[in-house]
Image (cartoon, coloured by chain):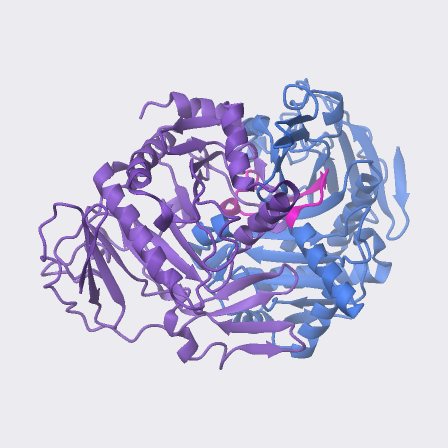
Chain colours: A blue, B purple
Amino acid sequence: MTDRLDMVRVRKTSRLLADGRELFYFDDPGTEAGRRADVADQRALPAPAAPSTIRFDRLLGEWVAVAGHRQTRTYLPPDDECPLCPSTDKHYSEIPAHDYDVAVFENRFPSFTLSATETDGIEGDAISEDNGFFVGQPGFGRCEVVCFTSDHDAAFSSLTPLRVRTVIEAWADRTVALSAVPGIEQVFCFENRGEEIGVTLSHPHGQIYGYPFLTPRTDRMLHNAREHARRTGRNLFADTLEAEVRAGERIVVQNANWTAFVPFAARWPLEVHLYPNRQVPDLPALTDAERDDLSHIYLDVLRRMEAFYADTLPYIAAWHQAPVRTDRELAYLHLEIFSIRRAPGKLKYLAGSESAMGAFINDVQPEEAARLLRDAVR
Amino acid sequence: MTDRLDMVRVRKTSRLLADGRELFYFDDPGTEAGRRADVADQRALPAPAAPSTIRFDRLLGEWVAVAGHRQTRTYLPPDDECPLCPSTDKHYSEIPAHDYDVAVFENRFPSFTLSATETDGIEGDAISEDNGFFVGQPGFGRCEVVCFTSDHDAAFSSLTPLRVRTVIEAWADRTVALSAVPGIEQVFCFENRGEEIGVTLSHPHGQIYGYPFLTPRTDRMLHNAREHARRTGRNLFADTLEAEVRAGERIVVQNANWTAFVPFAARWPLEVHLYPNRQVPDLPALTDAERDDLSHIYLDVLRRMEAFYADTLPYIAAWHQAPVRTDRELAYLHLEIFSIRRAPGKLKYLAGSESAMGAFINDVQPEEAARLLRDAVR
């Protein structure tokens, strides 16, 4: 099946891997048609791993996923065994094609799977024991891997704006698809970058999680946005953006449709939030022009951040999208990019105050970080 | 000034360091009297660093501390320059005495200080700009360092029960003292252990934070405890402990006054919660017998955890105490010990799902972890 995604003529091709997992190719405009579709997955793969479970923490009021099988997942393989490179005659990877632009596939070691309702959760189905103190459910949902390029040694920041545009189409397409699945409540597109942040595969890639619950941070933000709307009739995120623009001193860069700033109460030594100037709930709601501008400013922000320290930059880039079914008018699409690097050779760790109490100590002044990012050679 | 702490005849001696910071010695019962008191701090120290500020994050409804000066703090010094070892004729450390049992002193690079109200916050006093969008305050509060032993190469788990008892007295004494300071809302005693978790000094030590706000995780737990009390008239923590005891399968070890278990919705590969069997708000409320039993079971739990992997165990041990002034009847003193070690040579990192969304994925089954901890040779 091949879909033509109209807006920028990105072409999507769907395939199945040997164990039944889905794979999608997204081709840049201008890439020769049809050449992905012909290569089948040559591997003999075991059946997918047992699904995880989710458990409810009564003290914190939050869901936690328990996924024991992920302990065996691929861990820093040698370059010639990279599962995200295109397949060759000698090495069959997760991507059967001999070349690709952007490829998305179901994670082989997922925290959440759509098959979870059909099979065992915690030795059975949903559990609710001891008067609701131990509530568990099968880990229903979806985990996908997004390969940004076939070039093993590249980085998101070295992509062309055209390729970033294709990645944006892939994120939007997958957000629409996963939002249509009953039981998926939030779709999270993100990139973890750098061994220091726990990335087990160095090939440039991100992930998409379709969660069966509203994540705790989103839940808290929407709670505060609801209070703000009730009190003022306004959107908390839009008001935050406006206040940052008025203050000016933490703005990093702007273009016609986007604004990047270091937040007033930044938690991380290097943290930039990127908002569309127009309130939209999620990536699929962005116009063509907004997507075009995003591809440029995303690269600009990442390159400024990577120029910040004379050292590699481990980072997390996290898309905050509206919940699928609730509070879509309270939410406001935005990207949060942050790094644990606090100096060359030094990392910010989440120790007692942060991990146990949730109280962050940031060693870098947000205004100073913004000034250096504004002045960064990129 | 020398106080005699009656309960176990731990002796407390108070001194000032060269830059005016407070220092307290807590001597084990039986340690010869008076020998700490005579040694003065010989160093010429610069004035204490500028205080930090706290800033309110409107989106998450949480305070964040910004403490720029901590970037220069001591980082993995060579063993013979350890600032937590006793002073010698050649090396003046933070502790003037030539020997000590337990020593507590104000952190030289604090996230919070009692002097913060007297001096500049964010270029001035409390700020509240742009209709409350940018609310900041001086970082009032207190950060103390607790040295568990003068032996640089020891670990908490290698202390004697007698010494742990002295550490408990020190924690309780400091909790009482900091709780009496107007403006300190929560007292947090904790230990970060291991370079992998960001510890910059290997000498066995913990810390005490006196926060000027309720920490985010405590706030959320108390919110849920309040809802539970309203609905059931009962204490959420006590009910959780009872349910875990009834279930049994996650219990690690118990004694007359304490119960250790892996929580049903554990977030970390190795996580143990240790509760007193009687509901008390904080460490000072423990009886003599409860403190005695705690010194034994704390060591037992830590040693079981350290035996879990054939590798060093980086961990965080975090005392959850009731807020100083509010909700003391909703709270329940307990210790949470958790490790980022998920296998020998492998760490659990907080990547996109955890750091950006607050959604934890745990790779280890809590029941399996509890079983292995029960069976651990220690």
Q: Quadrant of residue B95?
A: bottom left
Q: Which residues are magenta?
A: A193-216
Judge whether residue B299 can be spotted in this image: yes
The residue lying at 81 percent from left, 53 percent from top is: A328
Q: Residue at x 72, y 26 (%)?
A: A116
For residue B210, side relative to residue A164 (left or right): left
User: Relative to A29, does residue A73 appear above or below in the rendering?
Assistant: above
Residue A211 part of the magenta-drawn span: yes
Q: Is residue A366 left or right of residue B210?
A: right
Residue A95 rendering spot, x and y as whole percentages: 70, 32
> How many tags in the picture?
0
Q: Quick one: quadrant of the N terminus of chain A?
A: top right
Vertical position of residue B292 compared to residue B93: above or below: above
Residue under the point 40% across and 44% down: B317
Q: Position of residue A264 (x, y in %)?
A: 59, 69
Viewer-nearest residue: B326 or B156: B326
| Depth check, front residue: A68 or B191 | B191
Q: Which of the image's four quarters has the C terminus of chain A? A: bottom right
- Residue that lies at the very extreme toward the bottom in this rendered image: B124
Q: Position of residue A44 (x, y in %)?
A: 68, 17
Q: Is residue B266 visible?
A: no
Examine the structure image and report whether residue B201 is included in the region drawn in magenta: no
Tell me where residue B311 appears, x and y as whole percent: 36, 32
Viewer-side residue, B8 vs A165: B8
